[in-house]
Image (cartoon, rainbow, N blue to C red):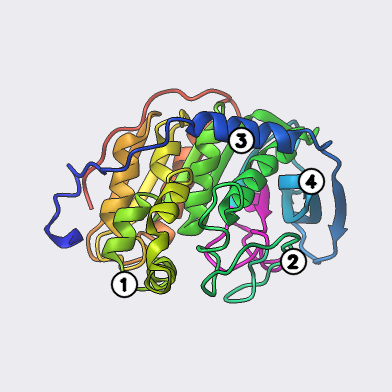
Amino acid sequence: MAGVLNIWEYCSSYQEPEDFDDFWTSTIAEARRHELVLKIEPVETYLVTVEVFDVTFPGFGGHPIRALLRLPQHCKGKLPAVVQFHGYSGGRGAAMEDLLWSSAGYAHLYMDVRGQGGDWTSGHTPVPVGSRPAYPGFLTKGIENRDDYFYRRVYTDAVRAVDTVRSLDFVDPERVAVIGNSQGAGIALAAAGLVPDLAAAHFQAPFLADIQQATRTVRAFAYEEITKYLAARRDSADRVWQTLAYFDGIAFARRAQAPAWFSAGQLDDVVPAHAVFGAYHEYRGPKQIRLWEHNGHEAGGAEDLAIALSAFAKVLGPGSPTYPGSPTDTRNS
């Protein structure tokens, strides 16, 4: 389907619930009632340019969420910060991985997604609450009730991760960005919609946007978890789509204001490119997108990171506490 769509003009048919804002306002307010008490412990790495710390902060329900904090050594003044979220079924990884952002001069907080980290990289945050019957994976945990849904907890954890990095006395709270790829980009997009004053964002092949249409289009992991769940529970479809409407990246894009850089792979069979454009076209802040015509779920890979580094240096770098201008709609590939 994505191959016959003009994705540059694609508009999603997604309709958000009337009480979307009330639901999320109350959810975040409830989480913030838990005092932001942090546990920060140094991690010995023998690195000479980066310091690493193991951080625990209270997420949804006050549940302990783990993250790794990496800091550039010998920097003066308050640092800009990048909060990163990882891809589906991964985790925050090892202390000596993902040194890019700290090496570039940022405080870098890499959050665990609760219960994940048993696949391609390690995680350290357990799931303290469960859900009703679900298909193996995470997409269907609690999927028939918005209050129980897995990503209600995850998106709230992401907001609290931003709260955490902003609370650090060596971070400039006005220069905080969110980033991620795939699931991580979907979480970052939710955070951008829920935290109104972020300074920048980078979304590489964002998962969990235009969810209903993507599920109908994709026949592969991970959207197939929803398909297989509904194949066994044929009478649950209405409840499932009603729940997912509260977690669709398009709704968060409509509320996000931070300057943002998107990317998509036109051949992506995990996150269809049209779903990325569905969120991009609805994004309210200054925005730019790069479509990689010959790439799949990896999108631009290292080239995307180079674009983000260059863009963030102008937005978040020393001497640039505010955004100097708007990104443009770039259609080269």
Q: In which quarter of the view is residue 28 placed? A: top right
The answer to whether residue 88 shows anywhere in this view is yes
Please state if 103 lies on the left or on the right of 296 as rendered: right
Counting the numbered discs, the total is 4
Q: CA distance from mark 1 to mark 4?
A: 36 Å
Q: Amino acid at mark 2?
A: His
Q: Find numbered disc 1 in the image and state the secondary structure of the residue it sits on.
A: loop
Q: Which mark is residue 244?
A: none
Q: Which residues are magenta?
A: 85-114
Spatial CA distance of label 1 from label 2 is 30 Å
Identify the element where label 4 is drawn: helix
**Dots 1 and 4: beta carbons under 8 Å?**
no
- Residue type of the residue flagged with mark 1: Arg
Q: Earlier in the sequence, mark 4 or mark 2?
A: 4
Dot 2 or dot 3: first in sequence order is 2
Considering the numbered disc 3 on the image, is that residue within a helix, a strand or a loop? Answer: strand
- Residue named by callout 2: 124
In the picture of the structure, the residue carrying the numbered disc 3 is 176
